[in-house]
Image (cartoon, grey):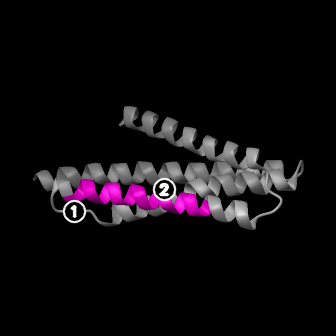
Amino acid sequence: MQTGMWEKRGDRAQQRYFTTLKYQGAVLALIALLLVPFDFVVAYSALLGGLIYLVPQLWHAWRHFKNRAAGTANRALAELYAGQIWKMALMAMLFALSFVLIEPLSGFSLFAALLLMQVMNLVMQVSGARNS
């Protein structure tokens, strides 16, 4: 009986998390499209900054939610820590690749979009948890 309760709670968390990622992707695409007429470099830099945030988040969410049968609480916590480490490594690699391979690049737009995605994630997760 307890197992069913945890599965329902996990399903709600998964739905809320992926909904947040969808909204973030939509906002990022809208911002990039709105910036294109003003400055193309700023537009693709903002898009790149948002993708540097969203791709590791999406990978981490997919990895976390695909394996529900973690076994013990210690095992689940270890998997969460490992996922966070890999997410940070992927983000660092994407940063390095973007600064090395993409030229010209607007650093301000890249970091502003990344920060916007971070804040949007925080606000949506907190408001979603409060409404649940």
Residue 19: percent from the left, percent from the top?
49, 51
Q: Which residue is mark 2?
A: 88
Q: Residue furthest left?
A: 1
Specify the amino acid type for callout 2. Met
Give the side of residue 113 with respect to residue 128, left or right: right
SS for dot 1: loop
Q: Nearer the viewer, residue 57 or 31?
A: 57
Image: magenta residue range: 75-94
Label annotation for residue 70: 1
Query: Answer yes or no: do the residues labelled 2 and 1 have beta carbons within 8 Å?
Result: no
Which secondary structure type mostly characterizes the magenta part of the structure?
helix
- Left/right placement of residue 23 relative to residue 28 reads left
Q: Secondary structure at mark 2?
A: helix
Relative height, residue 83 to residue 16 (above, below): below
Question: Can I make out residue 55 in this image?
Answer: no
Q: Is residue 4 above or below residue 126?
A: below
